[in-house]
Image (cartoon, rainbow, N blue to C red):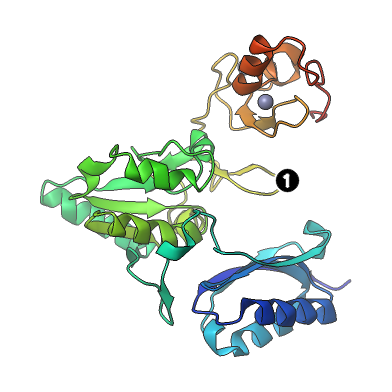
Amino acid sequence: MTESRIVLYYKFAPIKDPEAVKLWQRTLCEQLGLTGRIIISEHGINGTVGGEMAAVKRYVKQTKSYTPFRGTEFKWSEGGAESFPRLSVKVRPELVAFGVPDQVKVNDDGVIGGGEHLKPEEVHELVETKKREGVEVTFFDGRNAMEAQIGKFRDAVVPDTETTRDFITELDSGKYDHLKDQPVVTYCTGGIRCEVLSALMKDRGFEEVYQIDGGIVRYGETYGDSGYWEGELYVFDGRMNTRFSEDAKTIGECVNCSAATSSFYNCLDRGCSNLQLYCEDCKHIPETVRCSKCEARLAANPNDPNQGVLDKVRRP
Ligand SMILES: [Zn+2]
Ligand SMILES: [Zn+2]
């Protein structure tokens, strides 16, 4: 049996002709029998690609041979093409959809004006050093707010975001202006969002912004549950949540009964993809598995055609 693997990577670098890079990447993946998702923009490339190990190795080598992508860090992971049924290679205005492509500037070194990169150990050094000066370091969650329900950095600020675009409104609202002269460490799952978010924050007058190299994933590999991270990590695959160790705290609460849980389930109304936390006992009760938005919509319109369509997802 041949071994298969996935690689995850991103690289911010100026791309003059994203369409040409798209064609090259698609052909390369097709020739090597790889599947996955690749986004290319004028700011660089972001991909998750899987397949047979030898083919993935060739892919990595070829991709790095293109000058703008030289030095790209590829993170290897278990699994293979079976994790992605097909190949999707797209050109988009942004690698991460903050909705402000013109505010993001990149050069050969990456995003211009981003927060200082900290290795996991350096995060701890920063917190300790500032503490001796009597200054508190604030962790700032760069993900969608829902993800922080099951895990976040200790005392982190969690912006009110349903999508990445909401960060712009949040930052411009003045809510976080008290942090503008404070040390702020942004974090996200794998680091790509914070490359952009930290630059957008600095643009808006946040003076001392840092970002964690490799995001929560790399921090967790280093410190597990014995550092500043608390809870479980939301992940964008079938698992939904993952923990760094058996010592992980369960900080999420069932929306129905407040019992501790880290399990997200889809709202069962047709056409709704909101995720909510349910405990083992409550996840089976039909009356409780509709999200609050759908509840409100139904209250306003009892004849809603989606009412009662509660079998979209079969729960384990
Ligand atoms: Zn419950
Ligand atoms: Zn819903």
Q: Nearer the viewer, residue 190 or 308?
A: 308
**Can residue 187 be seen at all in this image of the molecule?**
yes
Residue underneath mark 1: 238
For mark 1, give the secondary structure.
Answer: loop
Q: Nearer the viewer, residue 18 or 141?
A: 18
Image coordinates for residue 10, horizontal then vertical, percent: 55, 70
Snapshot quadrant of residue 64 = bottom right
What residue sits 80% from the left and 71% below the top? 3
Report the image quarter containing ligand 1. top right
Q: Quadrant of residue 259?
A: top right
Residue 37, above or below 17 = above
- Extreme residue toward the left, this view: 133
Q: Is residue 171 left or right of residue 55?
A: left
Where is residue 66? Give x, y as percent.
60, 88
Asked if residue 300 is positioned above or below residue 239 in the image, the reply reads: above
Name the residue nearer the viewer: 138 or 228.
138
Residue at 24% across, 54% down: 205
Relative to 298, 139 lies left or right: left
